[in-house]
Amino acid sequence: MILRTLLLATFLSIPSLALAEIPTATPEEVGMAGPIAPAIDQEIEKALAEKKMPGCVVVVVRHGKIVYEKAHGNRRIVPNVEPMTVDTVFDMASLTKPISTATSVMQLVEQGKVDLDQPVSKYLPEFQGNGKEDITVRQLMIHVSGLTPDNHVNDYLDGWDTAYEKICDLKLLSPPGDKFRYSDVGFLLLGEIVARVSGQPLDQYAKEHVFQPLGMTESGYNPPEALKKRAVTTQEEDGVWLKGTVHDPRARLCEGVAGHAGLFSTAHDLVLYGKGMLAAQKAGEGHVLNPETLKLMTSGYDAVGNVRGLGWDKKSGYSSNRGASMTDKAYGHGGFTGTAMWIDPGLDLVVIFLSNRVHPDGKGSVNQLAGRIGTIAADACLATEENTDDKGTKLGIDVLANDKFAALKGKKVGLIANHTSRDKEGTGTHILLHEAPDVDLVTIFSPEHGFAGLLDQSHIGDSVEPKTGVHVKSLYGETRKPTKEQLAGIDTLVFDIQDIGCRFYTYISTMGLAMEAAAELDIEFIVLDRPNPLGGEVMDGSMLDDEKRSFVGFHDIPVRHGMTIGELAQMMNAERGWGTKLTVIKLEDWQRDELLYETGLPWRNTSPNMRNLAQALIYPGVGLLETTNVSVGRGTDTPFEILGATWIDGPELAAAINAYEIPGVKAIGIEFTPESSKYEGELCGGVNFIITDWSKFETLDLGWAVAASLKKLYPNDWETKRLPTLLGNQQVLDMINDGKTPAEIKVTYQKDLADFAKRRDPFLLYE
C-alpha cells in the first residue's frame, strides 16, 4: 500500500529562501478595461457583510503580471481575531485534485507509465470485483467511474491501508461511463496510482516534480509550524480549532495526505502554478507538462452532460465559481473550504480566490462570489478586445468589412452564399454587400440546401431574397455550374460559405464549378475564407480515384483534408489549370490546430442534418456509409451520431465496434425510429457514437470499424453496392468487402496521405 513521508518533510518552505518575484501592472497596461479593483472590492465587502465568509485573498493575473492582489477580512474570528494577509496559508481542499494529483498523473501519462484508457486495475490489481475492473483511469479523472462520492468516514479510522481495502470492496452506484458523479474516492485511487507507478508517495512526488520546478516553496501537505502560524482557521474538531491541519476528515485520517484533499498553499504559489500552466502551452524548459500533455489535460470531455478536463472543471454543475464570460478554453476547480482557481488561456488570465468560508461554523458560501470576480476580470479583458475588434478569429468577411470593402469597390458582384454566410456578429454577407458603398450586389447564388439552408431535396429552384430584393439563383437545380446567362452583368464572384472539412460535402464542389465558370468568362473570383471547423492539421482517409470524380468527389483529396476553402480554392485552381483570377481574403488569428470551439466563433448548422460540431467531426467516417442500406440518423434529432437499420442488433454491433478499441470514441447499443428518410417509421437497432476524447478521436478509424463490423456480423444484410459513391476508392472498397480490419485498411493509404501533405503545402495560408 501507499507509503507516507515524514509529516514535516513534505513542505518546501525554507525560512531563508526568498519568494519568486512576480511582476505587477495596472489593468490598462495588460490590455484590460479600466480599474477592476472597485468592482471586486464591492463584491467582497458585500459578502463579508452578509457573513458569507470571514475573509479572503484574491489575485488576478494577466499576461504574467499581477493586476489585483488584496487580502480582505480575517483568517480567524474565533476564539480570537487574526487579520487576513496576502501570504496567508490556505487549506486547498479539492484544489488538491487538479494541482497535485491530476498534474502528477499527467506527468506519468507523458512518460508513458500510465495509459488513461487502461483499467485502474492494471495499476492497482486489488481494485477489482463488482464491475470495478472496467473503470479506466480517464473515468476517474472526469468523475464518470460509477463510484460513490465518498465511502463512510469510519472506513478510514484505521488509516489508509484499511481504507483502501474498503474501497476495493465497494460496489458501483452505476456502470462506468453511465453517469457523472463527483467522487473523492476516485481521486484517492489516483493518488495511489501515482504512488505505485512512481515509487514515491503522492506528497513526495508532487513536491519534487510539480511544486519545486515551479518555485512553489509554500505548497505541500502537512505544513510545518512556521507556515501553520499564518494558516487560516477552519472548524473546531474535538475541542481543537483546525489551523494548518487538513479540514477534510478522510484526508486527516490518512495522515494528511490524500489524492482528493490535503494540499496547503498560498495565493503567491498558485500564481506561479497558473503562470506555469499558461507558459507550458509552448515548448520550453522548466515546464512541468509539455504542450501536448497540457492540451490533453485541459481540453473539454463529455462527462455525461457535463464538460470536464482531466482533473479540471470546464463547464459542469460545479462551475458556479467560474467567470461567466471566460472563454471555452478556461479550466479551473473549487474546494470545499472556499477556494477556487480558474486559468483561461483564451484571455491569458488567472483568477485566484482563497477563503476560509467554513470558519467558524461551516455555513459560509462563496462559489457565486468567486464566479462574479472571475466575470469582472474576464469582462475587463473582453471589453478591450471588443473595442479593438480583436476577439478570437476574424472571418474573411470581417476582414473585408474592416477594409471598407476595398476589394469590391466599383464591382458588380455575384455572391455565392447561404445561411452560414455571416460575419462574427451574425449579419448576413448579402446584407453587408448590399449596403456597402460603391458595391453593386447583382445576384445571389445558392448551393445545396438552398439559400436558407433548410431544404434537403435533389432539386432546388430560384427565389428572391426578401430583405434586399436580390434574385437568388440556385446552383442545385437545373445546373450546378453557373451559366453564361446567369453570370451576365457580373464582373466578380464572391464565395462565402462555411464548409465542414469533408471531401463529399458539396459546398467545395459548388465553389470549384463556379471558379471554372469564372475562368471561362474572365470573371474575378474572391473567396472570403472561413476556418475548417475540424482543424487544419489532421488529414485522413483514402484518396479519390480519378474515375470516381463526381459532385460528391470533386477533387483528388482525402476524405478529411484539413484545408480551408481558401486553401482548397488555390489548390484546385493550380492543379486543374483553370487560370481563375483568384483572390483569397484570409482569416485573421486562426491557427491550424484550432477546432471551431477554439476560435470564439459560434456553430451554425451548415445543413439541415449538420447540427453541431460533434456531428461534423463524426460525419467523414460515418457519413461515407450512408449510401448503403443503413440509416445514419436522418429523420432523428441526432443525425450522424447514430447508425442503424431494421436488421441490426444494437448491443451486438456496439460490442463489435468497441472491440477495435478506436481511440476517443465509444459505441452504445440503442433503438430508434426515424421520422423521415431511410427506414421512416420503422424501429431500428443501432449504435450511438460518443466522443470521449476529442484530441484522440479520428473519424475515419470509426468509419472503418463500423464497416468492418457490419461486414462481419451482417454479410448477407449489409448492401455495399452504392458504397463507392462517397468512398470513391476501389482498393478500400475491396478491403471492406474482403473483411479486412480497420488497421489493415488504414495502412493502405498512408503513402497517399504523405504525398497529399506535400501537394497541399504550397497552398497553405496559416501556421
Image: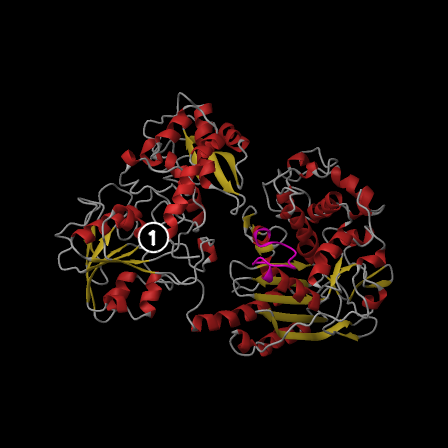
Q: Is residue 313 above or below residue 747?
A: below
Residue 755 or 68: which is nearer the viewer? 755
Residue 354 shows in the view: yes
The single residue placed furthest to the right in the displayed view is: 239
Residue 130 or 412: which is nearer the viewer? 412
The quarter of the picture where the C terminus appears is bottom left
Q: Is residue 415 above or below residue 14?
A: above
The quarter of the picture where the N terminus appears is top right
Q: Quadrant of residue 268?
A: bottom right
The single residue placed furthest to the top in the displayed view is: 716
Q: Which residues are magenta?
A: 279-293
Q: Is residue 283 magenta?
A: yes
Dot 1: few (<14), some (14–19), or many (≥20) neighbours within 10 Å?
Answer: many
Kindly state the secondary structure of the residue where label 1 is placed.
Answer: helix
Measured as percent of width and height from the top left, residue 637 is found at 41, 43
Image-based side of 267 in relation to 766, left or right: right
Q: Main secondary structure of the magenta part?
A: loop
Which amino acid, mark 1? Ile
Measured as percent of width and height from the top left, residue 647 is found at 42, 25
Q: How is the image coloured?
A: secondary structure
Measured as percent of width and height from the top left, residue 646 is found at 40, 28
Measured as percent of width and height from the top left, residue 541 is found at 41, 39
According to the picture, the residue beneath numbered tag 1 turns out to be: 565
Q: Is residue 135 magenta?
A: no
Residue 507 or 580: which is nearer the viewer? 580
Report how many numbered discs are placed on residues in the image.
1
Image-based side of 736 in relation to 259, left or right: left
Residue 316 shows in the view: no
**Identity of the residue drawn at 32% across and 68% down:** 401
Q: Is residue 473 above or below residue 51?
A: above
**Identity of the residue drawn at 31% across and 34% down:** 725
